[in-house]
Image (cartoon, grey):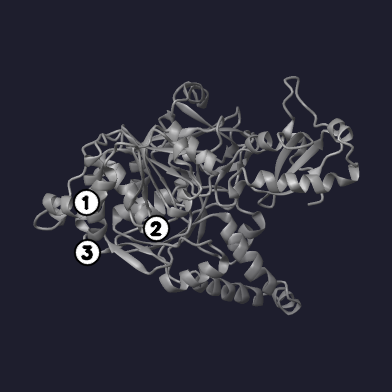
Amino acid sequence: MIEQNFIKLLEKSFIENWDLPAYTNYSKKQTYTYGEAAAQIARLHLLFREANVQQGDKISLIGKNTPAWAITYIAVVTYGAVIVPILQDFNPNDVHHIVNHSDSVMLFCSDKNWDNLEEEKMDNLLAVFSLDDFRCIHQRDGEGLQKVMLNLDTIFKKAYPKGYTADDICYAERENQELAMISYTSGTTGFSKGVMISGNALAANVTFGIETHLLERGDRVLAFLPLAHAYGMAFDFLTSTCVGSHTYLLNKIPSPKVLMKAFEEIKPTMIFTVPLIMEKIYKKQLQPELSKKSMRLALSIPYLDDKIYATVKKGLDAALGGVFKEVIIGGAPLNKEVEDFLKKIKFRYTVGYGMTECAPLVCYEDWSKFKQYSVGKPLPLMEVKIDSNDPVNVAGEILVRGENVMSGYYKNIEATKSAFIEGGWMRTGDIGVLDTEGNLFIKGRCKTMILGANGQNIYPEEIEEKLNNLPFVMESLVIDRDNKLFALVYPDYDAVDAAGISHDDMDIIMEENRKQLNTQVGSYENIAKIILYPTEFVKTPKRNIRRYLYTNLNINV
């Protein structure tokens, strides 16, 4: 058990960093100091009290990265309730399911998200509150929470007649082993798994960030990864908050152009990113210059190439703000061509390994010691072993245990049992090897899960289930190519013939199916193209498709 209590880490920071900037809405240039954020947190605590919210009750949260999102998260966990963060691009039906499955009593969401939700499908909620202005936008019949919100200023002044100060901060007493968060690895009904994260697991990630000085008091962080995702949440947000750093919340699509402008203005002292961002910068900004004939010629001249690479590195450093300690890449595999280039120019980068079930970090190594193509070494509070007779040379499933590991899957005993083996080891579903120095190298996945470009967990079976229900689809297989999803479809030709449809029209029909499918799934699960497959897929005796036969299939995309 981690010595530092998760809630008390937050309490201590808000007291000690009262006058420092905490959260900035980058788009609106609106900044909250730790003291101003603490006052908003106190207001929400009063709301929870008036609504008779109890410690351990679940509260869902969905919306863009904003100070209101951050304040709501902190308010929930420091009250002693359980936060249920939901990725904002989940399909509305998935959001309904998560709110219901998690037994949430309240929902905080942006107005944009609320426009797509249906309150009658979430009838266990006491109320719904807007992240845009904290007004009550829906309440259960007979509840007086709209009136409470209208009178909250009066309630607040009565509770703190001399004004709210750092001396008034006193957050809930709740042990680390208690549940603090439920994070859903997927949204779709029937496949959802709510990962139960204790205060201990969150504290373990945060204290690792503190002890390794990933972030320090007064540092600047640009949060462009979704805070509802475990990676961005743990470091851009929670670690940053606990040490007194300043988090700038981008709340825009992180295109290279948008990011470069933000990096220039903010000059972050640490950068947490996913491979897609670095790959876009490399392919769109660096590779075109390096591919010019004159540049290729210059790079072929001894000694001159070193000077050119040094200049490129200097330019890349400047583009990212120029003062960062290192760039930490995680959430998905890094393209080897890009990694080779970063290594060649001696760029300050490292690749880590984590998963939602570990809140998220499992492995990390400082950039100066990082071994190329690895994902670092296990954290001091984590153990990693390979399910192989020769873990150095023969790949096997990666097993982990330690302080960061989840408590299990919410209301899913069978999934929890299957996730753990004897000795408390958790199965990751990843395949890898450990070298003699303890560096972990991931070789592939033994599960079917696809890691999206921004680190989202994508379960192809969920998409296939929906696609198989569309017209003239017999069976389908979703595959990943260059961070895009494609669907192989074997059509139901009997139905096609019965309907008198020409086989030549199948491409048009499948394009309509693709458009329909993309309205039913999250944006990160959108299919780029449906490709007709000429035969049924090869299956196991249990009639499961032998997916590995199609992993490296040569198709025209």
Of labels 2 and 3, earlier in sequence is 3
> Visible in this render: residue 486?
no
Where residue 191 sits: x, y (%)?
56, 31
Which of 179/279 is in front? 179
Q: What element carries label 1?
A: helix
- Residue ID at (82%, 33%): 492
The residue labelled by disc 1 is: 152
Residue 194 place in picture, x, y as percent: 46, 34
Residue topped by disc 3: 19
Above or below residue 149? Residue 254 is below
Q: Quadrant of the N terminus?
A: top left
Q: What residue type is labelled 3?
A: Asp
Say which residue appears at 49% left-offset and 72% top-offset: 261
Count all numbered tags in the image, as a single digit: 3
> Could you tell whether 492 is left or right of 109 in the image?
right
- Mark sitting earlier along the chain (1/2): 2
For the residues labelled 1 and 2, the Cα–Cα distance comes to 22 Å
> Is there any visible trace of residue 221 in the rendered image?
yes
